[in-house]
Image (cartoon, rainbow, N blue to C red):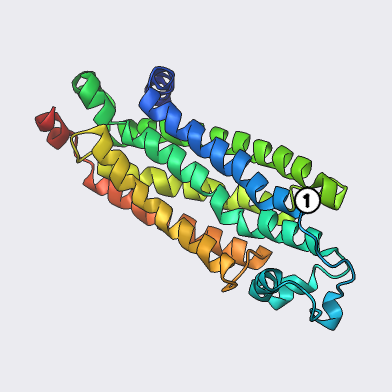
Amino acid sequence: MNWRGIFTIVRKDISVLRYSPAVIWPIVIVVVIIMGLMPAVFTVPYYFVEIPENISLEEGLPDDLPEDLREIYDLIADPLLAQFGGMSPQEVLVRYFLVYVFAPMFLIVPVMTTSVIAADTFVGERERKPLEALLHSPLTDEELLLGKVLAAFIPGVVVSIIAFVIYSISVNALSWPIIGAIFFPTPIWLLILVWVMPGVAALGLGASVLVSSRVKTFQEAYQVSGILVLPIMGLFVGQIFGVFYFSLVLTLILGVIVWVVDVVLFWIALEMFSRSEMISRV
């Protein structure tokens, strides 16, 4: 394996990203909106809403609880609601949204980051005209593909870690007036960070590499790879409606599923990758 050649591709592709606004800006916007602004939308309103303070979840919800809040409590799964015993109503709702509901939203960051970068791997180089020289390099197909994969995977993981830090600071700062303590990150989020997030990044990357090697423009590759966000939104909606919640067991199982799909996807990508076909398209 020619690791020097592989990391030459990685360094070149990452250096090119600094001069690609079409790649950088979607990533920045996604991180700012999801990790910075949306937590405020679900937290700040509870500073001003009057909520009864004498609610005991062990005894059930009181009759005088506002209807809109009752509807939210009804959506929280019973095992999860039991973990919130002794907390104020505001703290229950803040923890529910910021820790559990937003867990799948964080996964949009690695998907979008790797998808945008991977969409630029082959299509972007075809538009910038250096792809032909790269395809005629002495690297094998496997080495060329691995170099392109790492060039998108490494920035995707780095951006996701940065987004995680931003979210942690934002959550603790926004929830301080209600909770009065630093409680984030939680064990579930740490498991998502080290187990699920890299797998989701690889998932977006693998699908995007398949797409970008067969379409003609960056916009086509980016739009097709954006479909990968839909399953993540399904996880978000499922939690909103109380179908499930992100427990440690569910997070472990989700990670296993994602990594199995990754292995299959990259095996298909390697089988379908054809340097001669790509040369004919340049």
Who is closer to the viewer here, 204 or 33? Answer: 33
Amino acid type assigned to the residue bearing label 1 in the image: Tyr
Q: Residues within 10 Å of mark 1 (few under 14, many from 20)?
A: few
Residue 280 to residue 20: above or below: below
Quadrant of the rendered image containing residue 64: bottom right
Residue 234 to residue 191: above or below: below
At which x and y percent is residue 259? 48, 55
Measuring 79% from the left and 74% from the top, which residue is drawn there? 82
Which image quadrant: the C terminus?
top left
At which x and y percent is residue 171? 72, 44
Who is closer to the viewer here, 252 or 189? Answer: 189
Quadrant of the rendered image containing residue 151: top left
16 with respect to 271 (left or right): right
Q: Is residue 78 visible from the viewing direction of this image?
A: yes
At which x and y percent is residue 120? 32, 31
Residue 99 to residue 77: above or below: above
Measuring 81% from the left and 79% from the top, which residue is drawn there? 62
Residue 116 to residue 251: above or below: above
Measuring 36% from the left and 32% from the top, which residue is drawn there? 148
37 with respect to 13 (left or right): right
Identify the secondary structure beneath mark 1: helix
Which image quadrant: the N terminus?
top left
* Residue, far left: 280
At which x and y percent is residue 152? 42, 33
Q: Is residue 2 visible from the viewing direction of this image?
A: no
26 with respect to 90 (left or right): left
Residue linked to disc 1: 47
Who is closer to the viewer here, 157 or 177? Answer: 177
